[in-house]
């Protein structure tokens, strides 16, 4: 009964449709966090291992210093008590002090020295024990043909025995001032030693210095380095595993997406389908769903274009066939009245064809217009008022009038959309309602709000719409005119275009019949629902 357009087909469910990927910065990105975590994990393991071992080494050094200090304090105290002679000027009995130092013989990894008040070495446990210092000779250096020795391996110079002696002398000198010294220094062979120098005091007088040193520091450090090897191996393993994981989680899925996109391009497939990737709850899954939705939308668009082209060809073929028959018959008819009737048919077919081409052109440009224009705030009350005012200003005697009703307290009525296409909805609905209204009757346009939606209705007093055609009227090229209406006066695209624009704005367009309390049809009403913007 009403000129209609739109497919009227049930929309196929769209997998993942309506799910929007959230654009976030790196801390909110799952793959970004994964990449960052995996790259830092290996470094964290090395840092943690180094810190743990450093604390362990420092703890061992401190423990060794404490042990040497306790032992040195004990020896110094005993020497002070047992090996101090002379009054009122005390002196240290070096022989007895040496015997006391020998009594507290240190382990092989420790060395004890005794110095008098002048800093002269009195006793050394290594000398008393006849300890022989030895070390492995370095490998023989390469000799050139001309007899010149070539040292091809650059090396850092090691501290000399003189440097070690100076460091020991400085340590003893500080202890002779009454200050205990503890720390690490280099020995004559370049190895690090933990050393403690404790003054031997009698009241305020410093009678000598006892020096204890442990030479197993390098062995401790070597053990620490060996203990660090597992951390290094774990870090290498984590790095390799993270590289393989990132390759399987990112690189390979991206390659699959690229191959799927190439297959769409090369084999003219309609859509990408990778369900195993689409189920992933990360950026790759979101990208896959977006590509699937995009290609699915393109496929639906191509199907709609093919269907539209077929409908257009069918609708244009009818007037062309009629015109061809009329033209072929025109030369055979001699009766002027019959010729005039044929010319009238030709004129009507030309007008019908012109209307079809115009409406088809408008429908084909609709998608481009909707995608080109940016939505903005539209005062729907003003827009509809201008459209209704134009109909009222151009109305002739006997034409169907158009009246606007705006519910009290609802102005201003604003929606987010495109003013041109929204105006086309109301023009199509008003034209359709006027075509079904009796001459001199009235079409009512009403605006209101309800449940967060902007509601607009266009109602007429015509014969209404058969219940089975309430959706059919929105199919393309569907026309059902009342008796006496001029054939071909409508293309059947108006309502289809109106619904398409409404859905592009997130709204809906429905057709109903107005009925009285007895169930009699009073006319048709089209209800446009648009989302109300959140300000």
Image (cartoon, rainbow, N blue to C red):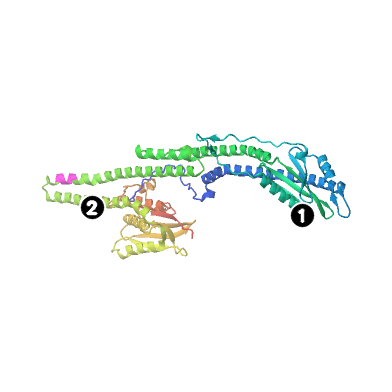
Disc ID at residue 380: none
Would residue 56 be visible to someone looking at this image?
Answer: no
For residue 325, side relative to residue 294 (left or right):
left
The kind of secondary structure element at disc 2 is helix
Question: Looking at the picture, how far across and down is residue 177, in whole percent?
Answer: 77, 54
Residue 332 part of the magenta segment? no
Is 192 or 234 nearer to us in this picture?
Answer: 192
Is 232 or 211 nearer to us in this picture?
Answer: 211
Q: Mark 1 = which residue? A: 177
Disc ID at residue 351: 2
Q: Residue at x 36, y 40 (%)?
A: 265
Q: Earlier in the sequence, mark 2 or mark 1?
A: 1
For residue 116, side relative to residue 185 (left or right):
right
What is the magenta range?
A: 324-329
- Examine the rendered structure and indicate whether residue 199 appears above or below residue 263: below
Q: Residue at x 83, y 40 (%)?
A: 103
């Amino acid at each position: 009964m009403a000129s209609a357009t739109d497919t009227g087909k049930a929309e196929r469910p769209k997998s993942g449709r309506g799910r929007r990927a959230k654009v976030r910065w790196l801390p909110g990105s799952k793959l970004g966090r994964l990449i960052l975590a995996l790259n830092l994990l290996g470094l964290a393991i090395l840092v943690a291992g180094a810190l743990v071992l450093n604390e362990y080494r420092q703890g061992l050094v401190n423990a060794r210093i404490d042990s040497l200090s306790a032992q040195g304090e004990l020896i110094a105290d005993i020497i002070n008590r047992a090996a101090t002679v002379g009054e009122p000027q005390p002196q240290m009995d070096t022989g007895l002090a040496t015997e006391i130092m020998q009594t507290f013989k240190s382990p092989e990894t420790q060395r004890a020295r005794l110095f008098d008040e002048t800093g002269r070495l009195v006793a050394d446990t290594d000398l008393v024990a006849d300890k022989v210092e030895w070390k492995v000779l370095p490998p023989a250096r390469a000799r050139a043909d001309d007899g010149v020795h070539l040292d091809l391996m650059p090396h850092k110079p090691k501290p000399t025995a003189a440097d070690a002696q100076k460091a020991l002398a400085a340590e003893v000198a500080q202890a002779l001032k009454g200050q205990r010294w503890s720390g690490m220094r280099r020995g004559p062979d370049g190895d690090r030693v933990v050393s403690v120098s404790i003054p031997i005091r009698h009241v305020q007088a410093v009678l000598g210095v006892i020096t204890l040193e442990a030479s197993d520091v390098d062995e401790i450090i070597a053990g620490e380095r060996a203990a660090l090897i597992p951390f290094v191996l774990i870090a290498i393993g984590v790095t390799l595993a993270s590289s393989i994981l990132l390759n399987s989680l990112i690189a390979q899925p991206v390659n699959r997406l690229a191959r799927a996109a190439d297959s769409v391009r090369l084999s003219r497939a309609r859509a990408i389908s990778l369900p195993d990737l689409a189920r992933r709850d990360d950026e790759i899954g979101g990208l896959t769903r977006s590509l699937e939705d995009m290609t699915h939308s393109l496929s639906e668009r191509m199907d709609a274009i093919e269907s539209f082209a077929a409908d257009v060809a069918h609708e244009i073929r009818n007037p062309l066939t009629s015109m061809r028959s009329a033209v072929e018959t025109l030369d055979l008819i001699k009766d002027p009245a019959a010729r005039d009737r044929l010319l009238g048919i030709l004129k009507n077919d030309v007008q019908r064809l012109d209307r079809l081409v115009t409406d088809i052109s408008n429908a084909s440009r609709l998608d481009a217009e909707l995608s080109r224009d940016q939505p903005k705030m539209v005062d729907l009350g003003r827009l509809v008022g201008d459209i209704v005012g134009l109909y009222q200003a151009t109305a002739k005697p006997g034409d169907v009038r158009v009246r606007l009703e705006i519910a009290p307290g609802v102005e201003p009525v604003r929606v987010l959309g495109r003013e041109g296409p929204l105006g086309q909805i109301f023009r199509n609905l008003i034209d359709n309602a006027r075509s079904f209204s009796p001459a001199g009757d009235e079409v009512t346009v009403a605006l209101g709000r309800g449940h967060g939606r902007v509601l607009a209705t266009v109602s007429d007093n015509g014969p209404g719409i058969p219940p089975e055609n309430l959706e059919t009227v929105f199919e393309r090229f569907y026309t059902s005119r009342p008796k006496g209406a001029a054939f071909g006066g409508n293309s059947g695209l108006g309502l289809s275009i109106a619904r398409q624009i409404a859905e592009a704005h997130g709204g809906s367009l429905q057709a109903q019949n107005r009925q009285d309390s007895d169930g009699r049809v009073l006319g048709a009403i089209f209800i446009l629902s648009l989302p109300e913007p959140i300000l």
